[in-house]
Amino acid sequence: MIPSHKAEITFFEVILGRRSVRNYQAKRVGKISISSLLEAAVRAPTAMHQEPWAFVIINDKKTLKSLSDLAKPLIIAKAKLNPTELNQNMKELFDNPDFNIFYDAGTLIIICGKTDSPFYSADCWLAAENMMLAACAMGLGSCVVENALPALNLNDVKAQLKISDKYTAVAPIIIGYPNQENTATTRNAPVILTQIAPN
Ligand SMILES: Cc1cc2nc3c(=O)[nH]c(=O)nc-3n(C[C@H](O)[C@H](O)[C@H](O)COP(=O)(O)O)c2cc1C
């Protein structure tokens, strides 16, 4: 049984304290921590109890740098299809050979979804949020790097990462020890379209 007020406060502290971390220490994330993150991920709700997720864990900065280098021209090409997405700052950033889309994090966990499962995308994103909240509770930082997806879903890259044809990469999440103050970003107040109460 989950009791106490204290647990509730801790839970909300995690929700309110989580933020996307883009600056990491060199310290590696250990195997036990990664197991805990995966355990949190697979506890997410899953439509029709299908559990359509599977995970790729990359703990090698060299591999991450080469994936980042592969991803950058694809990001620019994709953004050119929708010019409102591509501004000059973005172009300069992705053209810069020193810019790493994984922000030099030591670990990337890619949540992959089984595409024959009708709600695989929703399930994977719920697993992603569980994982990021667990990371925050464990003193780890995280950030979704959706920009990596065009590269991660290239046939050659899927083969390299042993992502079979049944799966697609859905949620790439970097993990590491933050090298920044963990001040959460702000949000607008919830927009309530309708609230119906009994008369
Ligand atoms: C679907 C999705 C894709 C995202 N992709 C990227 C990304 O490619 N690179 C990045 O730096 N941040 C990415 N983010 C992080 C958002 O920029 C971040 O969540 C947002 O600015 C709010 O900040 P916060 O997470 O610190 O509250 C992504 C977030 C989501 C939910």
Image (cartoon, rainbow, N blue to C red):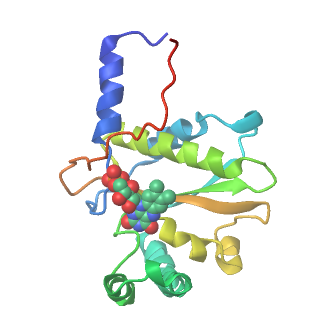
Residue at the far front in the pictured view? 199
Q: How many marks?
A: 0
Instruction: Residue at 32%, 12% (x, y): give it.
Output: 5
* Front-lying residue, 41 or 189: 189
Q: Residue at x 50, y 88 (%)?
A: 73
Q: Is residue 81 above or below residue 8?
A: below
Residue drawn where x is 61% and y is 59% of the image: 170
Q: Position of residue 6 (x, y in %)?
A: 30, 16
Q: Is residue 8 shown above or below 34?
A: above
**In the image shown, does 113 or 57 lie closer to the viewer?**
113
In this view, the residue in front, 51 or 118, is 118
Q: Quadrant of residue 136?
A: top left
**Can residue 139 be spotted in the picture?**
yes
The residue located at (72%, 47%) in the rendering is 119
Does residue 41 appear left or right of residue 54 in this picture?
left
Q: Is residue 46 above or below residue 196?
A: below
Residue 178 position within the rendered picture, expressed as x and y whole percent measured from the top left: 26, 54
Location of residue 137 by image quarter: top left
Q: Residue 127: where, in percent of width, then height?
A: 56, 43
- Identify whether 135 is placed above or below 72: above
Question: Ligand 1 lies in which image quarter?
Answer: bottom left
Residue 107 seen in the current view: no
**Foreground pick, 79 / 56:** 79
Q: Is residue 187 left or right of residue 69?
A: left
